[in-house]
């Protein structure tokens, strides 16, 4: 098995370094996010000769943004059988990430998978084992890890200038008016789309708004906390939290199972607390600080958002000591492209990407615990040895 894996990796590398150094990547999941990523991958230098989606209109739309002459399939394993593909992008609903990534690395493909890494902790553990056994490159789509803003801010906190950090506060404010009311306008393989999730009758509301149903994801809490939690744990050099408590508000989005307003408290073995507040019935921000993380040290505080970072030292009169605004870089807009470029570099070098599976799993554990706490209404603990949660 190890010899076949190494030979497959060498063959993949030889393909990548040929064909004008433009690796071939297949797109699995051609919804809005998948099509956006396809465009970014093409800009970086990838070719996209194959697209997969179980919903015919998405498949057709995906082919329009893929490379000229691209083929479309509805079964992702057929795409994985394509020997000309060096890598795949997995941009499906969360409940499909695990199986697709594991099948992809077994097929000798490198993978760029959207966050979160997985839907359950058990899935995540199996994914890490599969990736490490395969020697493939897997990048999680937490693009802050490749953003110049966040890389600079990370170096600030690593310098020790904050002193001891025992508290991290964060929030994400925006406004969501309603769920997507779209109707199905083409053929959908509903059974395949459901996968291992509970078998329910075909439902356009669930399909177009899968984000807001526990069977497939965790709503805005999970979608946005995936970025925030990952950045916090990255900056603090910490493992998964030892306990999580989540309190959610009422269901303001008609038809959703998951609240749009919530607060999460995370307890870490590294002796710090972090809290995150989501408010999607707030003002829709048009400036900065709609997504803010504050690292409160005993010598200084570091604020980080998508527009820049700022360092505030201890002082009788609060005074800004150092900051960096990245307007010349287009603010945060280039982060995804930088993240994809890092993926391409790692495909070529076979080095670890900025967002490897172990870090993706540490964040996913925090997210799974958040959902469990919200649904049970209790504090949830995680035992790292047994890999089990308890409330």
Image (spheres, grey):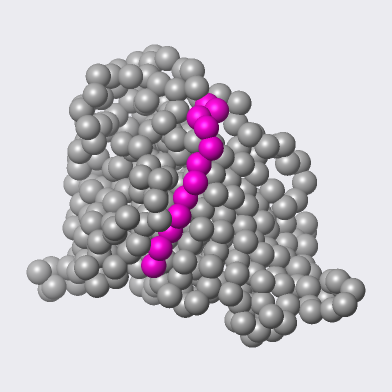
* Residue 78 percent across, percent down from the top left: 20, 40
Left or right of 240 on screen, residue 42: right
The residue positioned 45% from the left and 23% from the top of the image is 255
Q: Which residues are magenta?
A: 242-253
The residue positioned 40% from the left and 46% from the top of the image is 377
* Residue 155 percent across, percent down from the top left: 63, 78
The residue positioned 37% from the left and 25% from the top of the image is 206
Mark yes or no: residue 175 visible. yes
In the depicted structure, whether residue 250 falls above or below residue 40: above
Residue most toward the left?
1
The residue positioned 56% from the left and 40% from the top of the image is 261
* Residue 153 percent across, percent down from the top left: 65, 71
Q: Nearer the viewer, residue 117 or 295?
A: 295
* Residue 130 percent across, percent down from the top left: 21, 63
For the C terminus, the quadrant is bottom left
For the N terminus, the quadrant is bottom left
Q: Is residue 289 magenta?
A: no
């Amino acid at each position: 098995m190890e010899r076949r894996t190494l030979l497959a990796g060498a063959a993949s590398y030889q393909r990548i370094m040929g064909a004008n150094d433009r690796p071939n990547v297949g797109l699995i999941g051609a919804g809005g996010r998948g099509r956006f990523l396809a465009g970014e991958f093409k800009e970086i230098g990838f070719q996209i000769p194959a697209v997969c989606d179980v919903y015919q209109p998405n498949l057709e739309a995906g082919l329009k943004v893929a490379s000229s002459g691209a083929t479309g399939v509805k079964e992702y394993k057929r795409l994985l059988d394509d020997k000309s593909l060096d890598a795949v992008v997995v941009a499906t609903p969360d409940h499909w990430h695990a199986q697709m990534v594991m099948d992809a690395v077994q097929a000798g493909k490198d993978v760029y998978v959207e966050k979160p890494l997985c839907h359950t902790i058990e899935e995540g553990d199996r994914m890490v084992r599969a990736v490490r056994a395969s020697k493939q490159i897997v990048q999680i789509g937490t693009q802050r890890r490749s953003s110049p803003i966040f890389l600079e801010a990370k170096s600030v906190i690593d310098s020790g200038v904050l002193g001891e950090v025992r508290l991290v506060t964060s929030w994400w404010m925006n406004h969501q008016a309603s769920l997507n009311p779209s109707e199905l306008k083409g053929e959908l393989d509903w059974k395949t789309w459901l996968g291992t999730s509970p078998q329910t009758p075909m439902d356009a509301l669930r399909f177009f708004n899968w984000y807001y149903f526990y069977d497939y994801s965790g709503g805005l809490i999970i979608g946005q906390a995936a970025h925030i939690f990952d950045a916090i744990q990255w900056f603090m050099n910490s493992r998964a939290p030892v306990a999580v408590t989540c309190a959610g508000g009422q269901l303001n989005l008609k038809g959703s199972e998951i609240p749009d307003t919530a607060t999460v408290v995370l307890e870490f073995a590294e002796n710090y607390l972090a809290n995150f507040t989501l408010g999607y019935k707030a003002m829709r921000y048009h400036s900065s600080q709609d997504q803010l993380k504050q690292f409160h040290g005993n010598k200084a505080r570091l604020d980080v958002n998508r527009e820049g970072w700022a360092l505030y030292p201890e002082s009788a009169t609060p005074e800004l000591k150092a900051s960096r605004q990245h307007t010349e870089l287009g603010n945060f807009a280039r982060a995804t492209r930088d993240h994809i470029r890092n993926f391409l570099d790692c495909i070529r070098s076979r080095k670890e990407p900025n967002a490897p599976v172990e870090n993706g799993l540490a964040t996913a554990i925090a997210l799974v615990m958040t959902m469990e706490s919200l649904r049970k209404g209790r504090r949830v603990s995680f035992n790292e040895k047994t890999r089990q949660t308890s409330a």
